[in-house]
C-alpha cells in the first residue's frame, strides 16, 4: 500500500508540474452549469469571446457540489491560474477564505462583494434594468395585469421582481402584478415544464406580459407565452431572437462583459468594487430587429427618460436586498 | 428457485431445447409396458459438501403408483427436482419409457410427459380454473381460441378421470381439494403420463384425501404412472403398489407395498427401530389451569374468526384440538399466546389459574403471556417461532430475550451466556448438529422444532400451547417431540395441542375437542371415538350429542 | 441452494462490480474522445495520491458514513428509509441552531451540542413518517420521499426569510463564530508532526463518524434493542410472537436512523461550510442508500463503501478540473458504479455462484 501510494504521489507531482505552464485565466461556473441559457452561459460567452479573439486557452469547471467551491478556487490558484473568475454570489464565503492564502492571484466575483485586496467584486443593478422592462410591460399590457416568474426563491430574484414591480407601478399605478417563484431548490433554475405551467396559470389570471427571471426555466415561460399569444420578457442574455415578435424585450445583464474585461486585463486587473448599472451599460433592455415592432416611440422615450433619471438619481429604484422588503410587491 | 422455473413461467418462446424423448403417443402406451415408465440410474447430486443424492437408481413400471418415503432432508425433493429439471444431476442417467432423456429444465420435463403437483400450489389466485390450466400453454397470442380448446379438453379430462371442477370458478373461491385437482388437470392438459405428487395430503381433510386417492387410482387404471412423495406411512400403505425408502441421500430399499408394513418402513427410514405409538400413561388431571369463556375474535376485515369459544384445560392433561386448517385453531392459539390481531378485536374472558388474562394492548402481548407462565410452540415455526436468519444461540432466547438473566448490563446482552445455554439445551434436546453458531434455517425441520421446544419446555410453563408440533418433522424427531410433550404433561403442565394430523391428535391427546368454523363442534375422549367420527365433526356435521362441551 | 465462500461474497462481488462499472465508464470516456487511462490516473492520483486528495475523499466519505449508517440501521428493521436527505438537511438546521445561538467557549463543547441538536432534529424529521408507518400503515418509502421535499422547502423558507442576515444575498446563515471552528485533519495531525494538506475540509467529524460505526455495530449486534430490531426485520410475525411491539421498533429504529442522518450536519455544515447553506446535503442522503446496499448491512462495510464513494466524488472533481469531460458524464460514471455495486448485485452474483458450483463439481470428481 505504501509503495503504491508513493508511486501515485510521484505521478501526481509529474502531472502537476506538466500542467503549470502559463498563467491562464480560469472560469468557475456555478451549480446551474455553463449551458443554462442564462447567467452561467453569459459568463461562458464572455470567456469564449476572449479566447477566440486572443487564441489563448482558459481553465473552466462546472461545479457539482458545494464543497467544490473552495476546492476549485484553491486548485486553480495553486496551478497558477490568474485571474480566476467565478460566476455567482454563492462563492463569496469560499472566496473570503481562499483569497488571503493566494495574495498574488487575482479573483473576480460576480454578483457579490468580497472585500479582499486581491478581489474584484462585480455587481449589477438588476433592479434598475428590471424597472425599465417593468415600464415597458405596463405600457404594452392591455389587460392591466402583468406577471413575473422567478427561478428559485432567493433574495436576488426578489430584487428583480421588486424593481420590475416598481417600474410597472410607475407607468400604471393600478396595474396588478402576479409574481410566482418556480421553486425553492436549485432545480427551479432548470424546470421549463414548471415554467410553462406557471405561465398558463398567470395567463388564466389575466396576465398578458410575463417577465421570466428564472434561468433555464425561462425557456418554458417564453415558449408558452409565444404559444398562447401573449408577450414575454427575457433575462440576462438578449433572448428576443427565441420567439421573434413574441418577446417584448430582454433585461440584459452583461455578465459576459464582466468576464471578458477580467480576462482581457489578465493578471494586472484592478481589484475593487465595480457596479454594472444603467450608466455603464451593465444592465439594460434589448431592442433589436426581433422586437422593434413591439416598442413604440412613446415607450422608448418614456423608458429613456427614466433611464436618465435613474442614472442622475432623480428616480431611486428600491433594491430588495438592501432591507429585504419591497414596497410595491408582496411575496 | 422453484418459482423462477415454475411451469407457468416455463414457456418463454424459443428457449426450450428439444427434449431427447418425445412424449409417448397414446397408441404406444400399451406397447411400452415392458419398459419401465421411469428409470433412474446412478443419480448423484451434491450441494457443496452435502451429498443430497447418492447413486440413486429406481425403476417404476407404467401404470403403477410408486411411493417415495423418507425423512425430511433424505433427498426426496432433490431427486424429484432433478426429474423435473430444476436441478441437473452431477452424475447418472434418466430413462423415460426406455429412452434416455436429457431433462435440462421444466420445459423439457413437460415435453417428456412428466407433470408435477407441488406441495404449495402454483396457481394464480384471481384467475379462473380454465385460465390457470392454459397458463403457459397458450396456443398463440390470442386467448380466445386457446380457451375454447382448453374448455373442450378439460371437459374430456374431467369425465375421463372423475376430476370435476367448474372451469369458470375463480381459484380463490374454491377449496384446497379442488385447487389440487386444478394442478392435476394442468399436468394432464400438458399430456403428462407421469405424475409426481409432493406431499399432496398436507392441506386436505381426511375425506378430501380419500377422494384424492380415488382419483389417483382412476388415473392409474387409465395407464398413468404416479409417483407419490410423502412422509405418511399410512398413505403409502393405502395407495401405492411399490415403495422406495430414502435415507440420507441414499435409496435404502425398494419394496412391493404388499410385502412390507409400517414398522419396517419406519425402521428403514430412520435407520433404527422406531416406536410409532406414543407411549404414555393415563392422564391425572389436576386443578383448572385455563378457563376460556365466550372468546370471540374479529379480524381486520371484520370477519368473526372465533365465534364464542368455551374451553377448560386442567393441569396434567393434553387437550387436542382437531380441525381442518383455517377453522379458528390458529386464532385461538395466537390470542392465548399473546399474538393479538393488530387491527381486529378480541372479546370474552380468559383466566389462567384464576387470574384474568388481558386480551388487548401491551398487557396481552407475548412478553406478558410468558410472564404468566404460558409457553408457546407456534404453528409456523419458520415465521414465528424462530428467526430463520438468527443463529441457534440467538433463537434460544427468542421471546425471553428481555429477561434479566440474559443481560450483561443495562445496555448489552449476555451473548456468551446465551451461547453456553444454547449449547447446553441443544445437547439435551439432541439437536443435530449441536452447533449454536448455525443459523436456524440451516437445521432440518425436526431440529428446528427441537430448538423451539427446548426453549419453551425448559421454562417449565404451567400451560404450553403447541401448534402443529410435527409438521415437516421427520419420524425420528416426532417420537422425541411427542415424548417431551408427554413428559411435560406428567410434570403437571396443561397442554393445548393443535394439529391437523388426526393420527397425532388421537395418539397424543387425553381429551379431544373438534373445531369447525370458529366454534367447538364437540369434545370426545380418544378411546371412545375414531377417525370417522372426528372427520364428520371436522366437516361441521354434528350428529352425536354425547360429550358436548359444557 | 448452492453457496459461495464468504470471501467471494464480501470481496469478489464488489470487486467484479467495480471492474464492470470501470469498463463501461472507460467506453463512455473513449466515446467522447478522452483517454480512459488518463482519466483513471487523474481520479486515482487526485483522490488518493496526496493528503490533499485524501482530505477531500475523507470529507465526502464522512457524509456518506452517516447517511449510510442511517439507511443500514433502518434496513435491519426492514424499513427502507429514503429520507436520509431530508433528515440530514433538518439535522444540519439543528447543527446551525446549536452553533449560531449559543456562544460556545470551545469547539469541543459546541461539537457535543451540535451532535445532540443535529441528531434530535434529524430524528424528529424521521419520527413523523415512522409514526405514520407504525400506526397508519402509510408506506415509509413514500412518506420519507415526500419529507425530503418538505425539508427542502422548510430549509429554504427559513434561510430566505428567517435565518439570513439582513443585506446578504446568499440564502444562508451567517458564519459560525471562529471559536467553534472544528479542527481539520491538518490541525489534528500537526501536533504529531504528520504533514496533512491544509486545504481539504476533512475534519474531526470523521472521527465522530468512525465512533458512530462502532456504536451502530454495538447497537445492532450487542444490545437488546438491536436484537429486537433484527428480529422484527426478519419476521414481523415472529416479533409479535416474541412480544416485541412493531410500533415501538418502527418508531425507535427510524428515530435512530434519522438521528444518524442528522449527525451528518456536523461535517458539512459545521466542519466545512461553517454556516448553513441551501442544498448543503447535495444528495448525500441518497448516496447513503447505495453505500448501505454495498456495505451489506455491516458498519465496517458501510465505512469501506463510503470511502469508495468519497473517492468517486473527489476523483470526479479532479476529472472536472483538468479534463473536458462534461459534468454530466462524470455523474454518469458515478452512477454506473452505484448501479453496478448497488442495484445489479445479482447480475454478478448468479454467474459467480455457477462458477463456484462448477469448480466444486470438478473438485468432487
Image (cartoon, coloured by chain):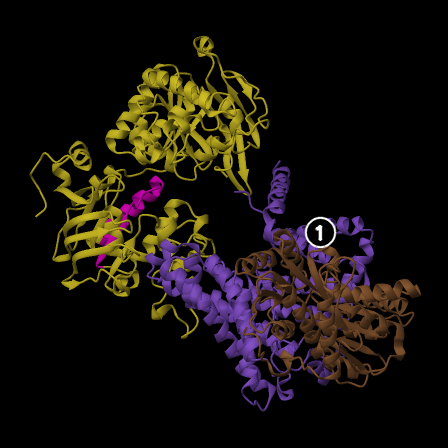
Chain colours: A brown, B yellow, C purple
Between A204 and B57, the one lying in front of the other is: A204
Q: Is residue B194 magenta?
A: no
* Residue C55 visible to an observer of this rendering: no
- Of all residues, the one furthest to the bottom in this rendering is C105
Question: Residue C252, located in which quarter of the rendered image?
Answer: bottom left
Which residue is found at the position 46% from the left and 33% from the top?
A: B250
Left or right of residue B366: residue C344: right
- Residue C92 horizontal/vertical position (percent): 56, 74
Which residue is found at the position 44% from the left and 63% from the top?
A: C129
- The residue carrying mark 1 is C19
For label 1, count other residues whose C-alpha is less than 10 Å away and answer few (under 14), some (14-19) or many (20+).
some
The number of numbered badges drawn on the structure is 1
Q: Which residues are magenta?
A: B462-488
Where is C177 relative to B235, above or below?
below
Where is B237 relative to B491, above or below?
above
* Residue B235 visible to an observer of this rendering: yes
Q: Quadrant of the C terminus of chain A?
A: bottom right
Subunit of label 1: C
Left or right of residue B303: residue C115: right
Left or right of residue B71: residue A257: right
Question: Residue A100, located in which quarter of the rendered image?
Answer: bottom right
- Residue B373 horizontal/vertical position (percent): 24, 62
Where is A100 relative to B534, above or below?
below
- Residue B197 horizontal/vertical position (percent): 39, 29
Between B44 and B11, the one lying in front of the other is: B11
Q: Quadrant of the N terminus of chain A?
A: bottom right
Which residue is found at the position 69% from the left and 61% from the top?
A: A248
- Of all residues, the one furthest to the front in this rendering is A298
Could you say whether the residue bearing mark 1 is in a helix, strand or loop? Answer: helix
Amino acid at each position: 500500500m505504501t509503495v503504491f501510494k508513493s508511486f501515485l504521489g510521484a505521478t501526481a507531482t509529474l502531472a502537476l508540474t506538466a500542467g503549470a505552464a502559463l498563467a491562464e485565466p480560469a472560469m468557475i461556473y456555478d451549480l446551474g452549469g455553463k449551458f443554462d441559457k442564462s447567467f452561467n452561459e453569459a459568463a461562458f460567452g464572455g470567456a469564449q469571446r476572449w479566447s477566440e479573439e486572443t487564441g489563448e486557452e482558459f481553465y473552466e469547471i462546472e461545479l457539482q457540489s458545494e464543497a467544490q467551491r473552495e476546492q476549485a478556487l484553491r486548485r486553480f490558484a495553486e496551478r497558477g491560474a490568474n485571474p480566476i473568475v467565478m460566476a455567482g454570489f454563492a462563492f463569496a464565503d469560499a472566496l473570503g477564505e481562499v483569497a488571503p492564502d493566494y495574495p498574488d492571484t487575482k479573483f473576480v466575483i460576480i454578483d457579490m462583494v468580497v472585500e479582499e485586496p486581491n478581489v474584484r467584486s462585480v455587481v449589477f443593478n438588476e433592479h434598475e434594468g428590471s424597472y425599465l422592462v417593468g415600464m415597458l410591460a405596463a405600457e404594452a399590457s392591455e389587460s392591466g395585469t402583468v406577471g413575473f416568474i422567478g427561478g428559485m426563491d432567493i433574495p436576488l430574484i426578489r430584487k428583480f421582481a421588486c424593481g420590475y414591480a416598481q417600474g410597472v407601478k410607475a407607468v400604471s399605478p393600478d396595474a396588478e402584478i402576479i409574481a410566482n417563484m418556480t421553486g425553492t431548490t436549485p432545480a427551479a433554475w432548470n424546470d421549463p415544464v414548471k415554467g410553462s405551467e406557471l405561465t398558463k396559470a398567470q395567463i388564466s389570471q389575466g396576465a398578458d406580459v410575463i417577465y421570466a427571471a428564472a434561468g433555464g426555466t425561462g425557456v418554458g415561460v417564453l415558449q408558452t407565452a409565444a404559444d398562447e399569444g401573449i408577450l414575454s420578457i427575457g433575462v440576462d442574455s438578449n433572448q428576443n431572437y427565441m420567439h421573434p415578435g413574441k418577446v417584448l424585450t430582454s433585461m440584459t445583464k452583461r455578465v459576459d462583459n464582466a468576464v471578458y474585461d477580467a480576462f482581457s486585463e489578465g493578471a494586472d486587473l484592478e481589484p475593487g468594487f465595480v457596479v454594472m448599472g444603467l450608466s455603464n451599460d451593465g444592465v439594460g433592455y434589448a431592442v433589436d430587429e426581433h422586437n422593434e415592432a413591439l416598442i413604440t416611440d412613446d415607450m422608448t422615450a418614456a423608458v429613456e427618460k427614466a433611464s436618465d433619471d435613474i442614472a442622475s438619481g432623480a428616480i431611486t429604484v428600491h433594491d430588495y436586498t438592501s432591507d429585504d422588503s419591497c414596497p410595491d410587491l408582496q411575496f | 428457485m422453484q418459482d423462477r422455473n415454475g411451469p407457468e413461467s416455463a414457456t418463454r418462446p424459443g428457449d426450450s431445447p428439444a427434449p431427447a424423448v418425445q412424449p409417448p403417443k397414446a397408441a404406444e402406451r400399451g406397447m411400452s409396458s415392458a419398459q419401465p415408465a421411469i428409470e433412474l440410474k446412478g443419480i448423484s447430486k451434491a450441494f457443496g459438501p452435502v451429498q443430497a443424492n447418492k447413486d440413486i437408481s429406481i425403476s417404476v413400471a407404467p401404470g403403477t403408483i410408486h411411493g417415495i418415503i423418507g425423512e425430511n432432508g433424505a433427498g426426496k425433493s432433490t431427486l424429484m427436482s432433478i426429474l423435473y429439471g430444476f436441478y441437473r444431476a452431477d452424475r447418472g442417467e434418466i430413462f423415460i419409457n426406455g429412452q434416455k432423456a436429457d431433462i435440462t429444465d421444466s420445459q423439457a420435463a413437460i415435453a417428456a410427459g412428466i407433470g408435477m403437483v407441488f406441495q404449495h400450489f402454483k396457481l394464480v389466485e384471481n384467475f379462473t380454473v380454465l385460465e390457470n390450466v392454459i397458463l403457459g400453454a397458450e396456443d398463440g397470442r390470442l386467448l380466445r381460441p386457446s380457451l375454447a380448446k382448453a374448455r373442450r379438453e378439460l371437459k374430456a379430462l374431467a369425465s375421463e378421470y372423475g376430476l370435476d371442477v367448474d372451469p369458470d370458478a375463480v381459484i380463490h373461491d374454491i377449496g384446497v381439494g379442488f385447487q389440487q385437482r386444478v394442478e392435476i388437470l394442468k399436468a394432464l392438459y400438458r399430456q403428462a403420463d407421469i405424475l409426481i405428487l409432493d406431499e399432496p395430503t398436507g392441506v386436505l381433510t381426511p375425506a378430501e384425501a380419500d377422494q384424492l386417492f380415488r382419483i389417483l387410482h382412476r388415473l392409474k387404471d387409465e395407464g398413468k404412472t404416479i409417483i407419490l412423495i410423502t412422509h405418511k406411512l399410512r398413505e403409502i400403505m393405502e395407495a401405492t403398489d411399490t415403495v422406495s425408502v430414502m435415507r440420507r441421500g441414499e435409496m435404502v430399499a425398494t419394496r412391493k407395498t404388499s410385502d412390507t408394513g409400517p414398522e419396517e418402513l419406519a425402521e428403514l427410514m430412520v435407520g433404527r427401530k422406531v416406536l410409532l405409538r406414543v407411549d404414555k400413561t393415563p392422564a391425572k388431571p389436576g386443578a383448572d389451569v385455563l378457563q376460556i369463556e365466550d372468546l370471540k375474535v374479529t379480524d381486520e376485515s371484520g370477519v368473526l374468526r372465533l365465534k364464542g369459544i368455551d374451553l377448560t384445560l386442567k393441569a396434567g392433561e393434553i387437550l387436542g384440538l382437531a380441525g381442518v386448517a383455517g377453522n379458528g385453531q390458529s386464532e385461538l392459539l395466537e390470542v392465548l399466546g399473546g399474538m393479538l390481531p393488530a387491527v381486529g378485536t378480541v372479546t370474552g374472558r380468559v383466566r389462567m389459574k384464576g387470574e384474568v388474562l388481558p386480551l388487548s394492548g401491551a398487557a396481552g402481548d407475548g412478553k406478558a403471556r410468558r410472564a404468566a407462565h404460558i409457553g408457546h410452540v407456534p404453528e409456523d415455526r419458520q415465521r414465528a417461532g424462530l428467526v430463520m436468519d438468527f443463529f441457534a444461540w440467538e433463537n434460544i432466547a427468542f421471546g425471553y430475550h428481555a429477561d434479566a438473566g440474559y443481560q450483561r448490563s443495562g445496555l448489552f446482552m449476555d451473548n456468551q451466556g446465551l451461547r453456553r445455554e444454547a449449547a447446553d439445551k441443544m445437547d439435551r434436546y439432541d439437536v443435530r448438529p449441536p452447533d449454536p453458531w448455525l443459523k436456524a434455517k440451516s437445521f432440518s425441520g425436526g431440529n428446528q422444532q427441537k430448538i423451539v421446544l427446548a426453549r419453551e419446555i425448559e421454562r417449565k410453563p404451567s400451560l404450553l400451547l403447541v401448534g402443529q408440533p410435527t409438521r415437516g418433522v421427520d419420524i425420528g424427531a416426532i417420537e422425541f417431540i411427542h415424548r417431551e410433550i408427554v413428559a411435560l404433561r406428567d410434570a403437571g403442565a396443561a397442554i393445548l395441542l393443535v394439529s391437523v394430523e388426526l393420527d397425532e391428535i388421537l395418539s397424543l391427546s387425553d381429551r379431544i375437542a373438534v373445531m369447525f368454523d370458529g366454534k367447538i363442534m364437540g369434545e370426545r375422549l380418544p378411546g371412545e371415538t375414531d377417525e370417522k367420527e372426528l372427520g364428520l365433526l371436522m366437516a361441521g356435521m354434528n350428529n352425536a350429542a354425547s360429550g358436548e362441551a359444557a | 441452494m448452492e453457496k459461495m465462500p464468504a470471501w467471494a461474497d464480501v470481496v469478489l462481488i464488489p470487486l467484479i462490480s467495480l471492474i464492470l462499472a470501470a469498463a463501461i465508464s472507460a467506453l463512455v470516456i473513449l466515446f467522447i474522445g478522452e483517454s480512459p487511462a488518463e482519466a483513471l490516473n487523474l481520479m486515482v492520483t487526485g483522490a488518493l495520491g496526496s493528503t490533499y486528495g485524501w482530505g477531500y475523499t475523507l470529507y465526502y466519505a464522512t457524509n456518506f458514513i452517516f447517511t449510510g449508517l442511517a439507511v443500514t440501521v433502518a434496513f435491519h428493521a426492514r424499513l427502507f428509509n429514503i429520507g436520509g436527505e431530508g433528515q440530514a438537511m433538518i439535522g444540519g438546521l439543528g447543527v446551525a441552531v446549536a452553533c449560531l445561538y449559543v456562544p460556545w467557549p470551545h469547539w469541543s463543547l459546541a461539537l457535543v451540542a451540535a451532535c445532540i441538536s443535529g441528531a434530535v432534529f434529524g430524528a424528529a424529521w424521521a419520527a413523523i413518517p415512522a409514526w405514520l408507518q407504525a400506526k397508519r400503515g402509510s408506506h415509509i418509502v413514500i412518506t420519507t420521499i415526500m419529507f425530503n421535499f418538505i425539508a427542502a422547502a422548510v430549509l429554504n423558507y427559513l434561510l430566505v426569510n428567517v435565518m439570513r442576515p439582513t443585506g446578504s444575498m446568499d440564502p444562508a446563515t451567517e458564519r459560525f463564530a471562529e471559536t467553534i471552528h472544528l479542527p481539520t485533519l491538518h490541525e489534528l495531525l500537526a501536533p504529531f508532526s504528520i504533514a496533512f494538506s491544509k486545504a481539504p475540509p476533512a475534519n474531526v467529524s470523521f472521527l465522530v463518524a468512525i465512533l458512530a460505526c462502532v456504536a451502530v455495530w454495538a447497537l445492532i449486534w450487542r444490545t437488546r434493542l438491536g436484537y429486537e430490531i433484527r428480529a422484527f426485520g426478519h419476521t414481523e410475525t415472529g416479533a409479535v410472537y416474541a412480544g416485541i411491539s412493531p410500533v415501538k421498533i418502527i418508531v425507535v429504529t427510524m428515530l435512530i436512523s434519522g438521528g444518524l442522518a442528522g449527525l451528518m450536519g456536523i461535517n458539512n455544515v459545521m466542519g466545512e461550510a461553517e454556516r448553513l447553506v441551501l442544498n448543503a446535503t447535495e444528495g448525500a442522503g441518497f448516496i447513503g442508500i447505495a453505500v448501505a446496499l454495498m456495505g451489506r448491512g455491516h458498519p465496517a462495510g458501510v465505512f469501506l463503501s463510503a470511502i469508495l464513494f468519497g473517492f468517486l466524488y473527489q476523483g470526479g472533481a479532479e476529472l472536472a478540473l483538468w479534463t473536458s469531460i462534461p459534468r454530466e458524464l462524470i455523474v454518469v460514471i458515478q452512477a454506473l458504479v452505484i448501479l453496478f455495486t448497488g442495484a445489479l448485485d445479482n447480475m454478478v452474483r448468479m454467474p459467480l455462484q455457477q462458477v463456484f458450483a462448477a469448480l466444486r463439481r470438478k473438485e468432487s470428481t
